[in-house]
Amino acid sequence: MRPADPGSGLREGVGALSPQAIAAQFGRNLAEARGWEGLSQTQLARRIAKQQSDVARWEVGERIPRLDHVVALADAVGVQVRDLLYGIE
């Protein structure tokens, strides 16, 4: 297997989303999953030891959480990580 050319960009030709689109899609997925669990942003934040403002920023697509937070969020709302990443290529 040939390593990727650092100058070519790994996203080229893969139909990749922009960072803003990724953040927005993740936020929609998180908000929907939180709703399925019947949790407020504050309740979810408490479950993962974060602030409500962090959850709000993730849900509106202002920020993208770190991978360890994605795993904790999935566990907290009772879904698979892949469910939170649905629609993100």
Image (spheres, grey):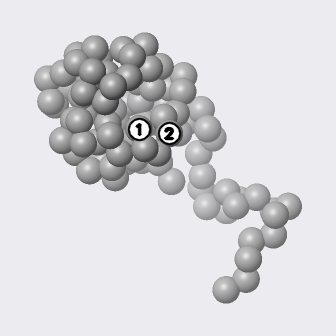
Residue at screen point 44% across, 20% down: 54
Displayed quadrant of residue 84: top left
Residue at screen point 41% across, 30% down: 27
SS label for mark 2: loop
Q: Are marks 2 and 1 in contact (CB under 8 Å)?
A: yes
Q: Residues within 10 Å of mark 2 (few under 14, many from 20)?
A: few
Which mark, by number, is residue 66? 2
Report the amino acid beneath label 1. His
SS label for mark 1: helix
Q: Residue furthest right?
A: 7
Report the amino acid beneath label 2. Arg
Q: Is residue 81 visible?
A: yes
Q: Is residue 56 visible?
A: no
Residue at screen point 33% across, 49% down: 81
Residue at screen point 20% across, 25% down: 35
In this figure, which residue is indicated by the disc labeled 1? 69
Q: Residues within 10 Å of mark 1 (few under 14, many from 20)?
A: some
Q: Residue furthest front?
A: 49
Is residue 33 rendered to the left or right of residue 54? left
